[in-house]
Image (cartoon, grey):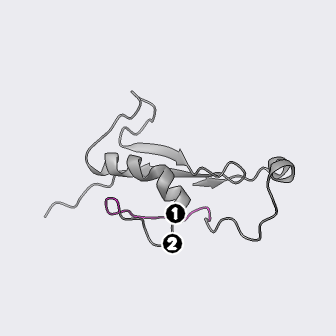
Amino acid sequence: MKTAKYDDLIEQFENPIEHACDMKVGQIFIANGWEKPANMCESAWESMSAFVMTLAHGGENLYDGWMKNRKSAMISCNDGFRPVSFYIEALEEDAE
């Protein structure tokens, strides 16, 4: 994942806020269907949950070849001032 912060947009458009985001580069979350992983930002989850569900149920090749890994997606949260990008990929289940 990667984070960005646009101070020029914040200065021009956003009212001052004390706390905005707890996401850190390198965090790993594992989702179980529609259940939001613990400690994940609600807004970020809303941005990505449909992609997570699609990949978890065998969907692949989103947008006709968009990603090199057919079972993945790169999704950003909807905070235009501090976007956080998440790499999402389907995990293979262990054969028993």
Spot occupied by residue 84 in the image (x, y as percentages of width and height)? 61, 54
Q: How many marks?
A: 2
Depth check, front residue: 10 or 73? 10
Figure quadrant of residue 30: bottom left
Query: In the image, what residue occupies the spot 26% across and 48% down?
Result: 57
Spot occupied by residue 45 in the image (x, y as percentages of width and height)? 48, 58
Q: Which residue is mark 1?
A: 42
Depth check, front residue: 90 or 49? 49
Quadrant occupied by the N terminus = bottom right
Mark identifier at residue 57: none
Q: Amino acid at mark 2?
A: Asn
User: Magenta segment range?
Assistant: 24-34
- Few, some or many C-alpha atoms within 10 Å of disc 2 (few <14, some 14-19, many ≥20)? few
Report whether 94 appears left or right of 43: left
Spot occupied by residue 65 in the image (x, y as percentages of width and height)? 41, 29
Q: In the figure, 6 relative to 70: above or below?
A: below
Spot occupied by residue 21 in the image (x, y as percentages of width and height)? 65, 65
- Few, some or many C-alpha atoms within 10 Å of disc 1 (few <14, some 14-19, many ≥20)? few
Figure quadrant of residue 67: top left
Q: How far is mark 1 from mark 2, CA to CA?
A: 9 Å
Q: Which residue is mark 2?
A: 39
